[in-house]
């Protein structure tokens, strides 16, 4: 039991409510897209599989594939290279050089390719800056749309990162104040009372879900804010204070100094042997590789590893890029192992929930879904308690617009992606245009329809849209379930079934007619009870 004076409890309740209301709709968007992003890799495989799934993340011919691409890339773009497996098992490689834009901001420019490891065929090739390459990346577009919405709400840097960082802080405030106002914390883990009033029942479910979700919400908010602020504020501030504004020097201090420069041309070493050695040392799969100064005597390669079985964190190794000799084991952050580096590395598994494969992702998905529910119902409860005020009635319609309309708008982007993936076209632009257009239509419906009817219309539309995506994927050239099993893409069937089940649940939720609205007086009484319960 947490005992606080009544006035302090009321103050915390106000802070808890206003922190959720002021940024709640944007926070809801970040959480919902974060829930989808947990399975971003699986969504990429589902939406863009290859004819046959490669058996290994980095096949035994990786070195030959990368050298073959390098032979077609201008020497000016061979200053650096990084590669990793992505959608469907493709090998993504980007040969690039470092530049500065007109504002002095570091950027990269080069040639990006996607390779089918089994055939050696280049599937996709783009030349340009990192941003231009990303804009023309149609292979991973569907998963990337959700990730961009989650990371920066599709707002340009650094403002998008600053915004999501602020939302993370608001979520932490809501989590801490929610913990403080729950006087009977253990009891409220299991308390669901019967109410004639629907919104009073919703209040109990909100409290139960929020109470169970408090630790997870704090972890997610803290790690999310860390990622948003570390790149948008942390590195620039550190560079300004300690390195006279030179971000390159600041990054070198964090990740380590490069070897002495030697531009003498030299053949690249045996990449496959280096990868095999790294796997033997770590007892884990390779996650990501990079090479600086490709084709020069001072070339060096970094190999980043997945965590070994039973461990949360992976490691990385550096190799001489020409001889293939092992040089050192290196922590993720810093030049030598440190507590700060380990804590920084822990942010990734705690935020993404990928430390135990599909099992931990499933748990993070469920907890994230509960967080979205708590955010949405919290806004509903706050606005309904003030429904007799015109301003709050309007805000309540906005909450319904975002709460029910955002999932539908996000699902709809698949209806732009799949047809254009087959026919060709500006997939990224079409997805954004459809998302914004549908959001605008739903906004109009939120004005002209009463909230119960709006809920029914949007739930029905969401259910139909979810159930239709597997069919659209198949009709636009995706594999059937039989073909997916035969080619190693079992996850395609899993996601199809999840979409069909989710669509059915949306339609099933319409079986009951809308309940009568709770009176403002009853809801205000519920609010007073929240502050005085003991």
Image (cartoon, rainbow, N blue to C red):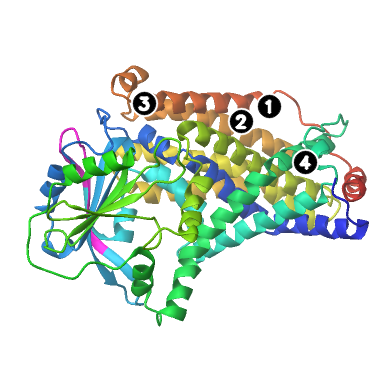
Sooner in the amino-acid sequence: mark 4 or mark 2: 4
Label 1 secondary element: loop
Find residue 510 and name its label.
1
> Observer-nearest residue: 518 or 128?
128
Q: Tell me: residue 516, above or below residue 494.
A: below
Q: Which residue is mark 3?
A: 474
Cα separation between marks 4 and 2? 27 Å
Q: Which residue is mark 2?
A: 460
Mark 1 in CB contact with mark 2 (< 8 angstroms):
yes
Q: Residues within 10 Å of mark 4 (few under 14, many from 20)?
A: many
Nearer mark to the viewer, of 4 and 2: 4
Nearer mark to the viewer, of 3 and 2: 3
Task: Residue 237: give x, y in percent of width and height.
Answer: 48, 75
Nearer mark to the viewer, of 3 and 4: 4
Image quarter of the N terminus? top right
Sooner in the amino-acid sequence: mark 1 or mark 3: 3
> 415 left or right of 180?
left
Residue 444 seen in the figure = no
Numbered range of the magenta stretch: 109-124
Find residue 423 and name its label.
none
Cα separation between marks 4 and 1? 24 Å
> 489 left or right of 1?
left
> 72 left or right of 528?
left
Q: Tell me: residue 526, above or below residue 390.
A: above
Magenta span contains residue 86: no
Find residue 207 and name its label.
4
Label 4 secondary element: helix
Label 2 secondary element: helix
Task: Residue 278: give x, y in percent of width and height.
Answer: 26, 44
> Observer-nearest residue: 394 or 288?
288
Cα separation between marks 3 and 2? 22 Å
């Amino acid at each position: 039991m947490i005992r606080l004076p009544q006035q302090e409890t009321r103050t915390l309740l106000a802070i808890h409510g206003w922190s959720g209301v002021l940024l709640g709709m944007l926070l809801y968007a970040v959480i919902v897209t974060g829930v989808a992003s947990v399975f971003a890799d699986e969504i990429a495989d589902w939406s863009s599989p290859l004819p046959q799934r490669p058996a290994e993340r980095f096949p035994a011919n990786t070195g030959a594939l990368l050298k073959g691409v390098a032979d077609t890339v201008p020497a000016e773009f061979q200053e650096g290279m990084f590669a990793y497996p992505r959608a469907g098992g493709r090998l993504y490689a980007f040969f690039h050089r470092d530049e500065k834009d007109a504002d002095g901001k570091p950027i990269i420019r080069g040639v990006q390719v996607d390779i089918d490891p089994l055939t050696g065929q280049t599937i996709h090739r783009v030349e340009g800056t990192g941003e231009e390459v990303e804009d023309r990346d149609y292979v991973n577009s569907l998963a990337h749309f959700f990730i961009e919405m989650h990371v920066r709400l599709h707002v340009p840097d650094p403002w998008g990162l600053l915004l999501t960082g602020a939302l993370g802080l608001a979520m932490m405030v809501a989590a801490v104040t929610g913990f403080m106002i729950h006087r009977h914390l253990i009891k409220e883990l299991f308390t669901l009372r019967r109410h004639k009033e629907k919104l009073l029942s919703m209040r109990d479910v909100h409290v139960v879900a929020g109470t169970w979700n408090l630790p997870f919400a704090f972890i997610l908010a803290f790690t999310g804010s860390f990622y948003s602020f570390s790149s948008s504020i942390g590195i620039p501030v550190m560079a300004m204070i300690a390195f006279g504004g030179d971000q390159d020097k600041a990054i070198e201090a964090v990740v380590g100094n490069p070897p002495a420069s030697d531009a003498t041309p030299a053949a690249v070493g045996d990449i496959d042997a280096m990868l095999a050695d790294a796997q033997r040392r770590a007892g884990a799969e390779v996650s990501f590789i990079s090479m600086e100064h490709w084709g020069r005597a001072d070339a060096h390669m970094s190999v980043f590893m997945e965590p070994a079985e039973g461990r949360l964190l992976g490691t990385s190794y550096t190799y001489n890029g020409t001889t293939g000799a092992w040089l050192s084991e290196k922590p993720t952050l810093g030049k030598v192992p440190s507590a700060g580096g380990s804590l920084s590395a822990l942010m990734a598994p705690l935020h993404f929930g990928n430390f135990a494969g599909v099992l931990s992702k499933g748990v993070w998905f469920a907890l994230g879904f509960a967080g979205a529910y708590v955010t949405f119902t919290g806004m509903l409860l706050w606005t309904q308690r003030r429904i007799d005020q015109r301003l709050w009635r309007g805000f309540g319609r906005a909450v319904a617009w975002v709460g029910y309309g955002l999932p539908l708008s996000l699902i709809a982007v698949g209806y732009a992606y799949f047809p254009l993936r087959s026919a060709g076209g500006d997939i990224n632009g079409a997805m954004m245009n459809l998302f914004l257009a549908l959001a605008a239509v739903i906004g109009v419906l939120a004005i002209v329809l009463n909230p119960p009817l709006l809920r029914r219309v949007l739930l029905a539309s969401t259910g139909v849209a979810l159930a239709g995506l597997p069919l659209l994927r198949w009709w636009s050239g995706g594999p059937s379930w039989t073909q997916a099993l035969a080619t190693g893409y079992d996850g395609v069937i899993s996601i199809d079934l999840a979409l069909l089940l989710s669509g059915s649940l949306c339609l099933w939720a319409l079986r009951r007619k809308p309940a009568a609205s709770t009176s403002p007086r009853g809801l205000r009484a519920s609010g007073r009870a929240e502050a005085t319960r003991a």
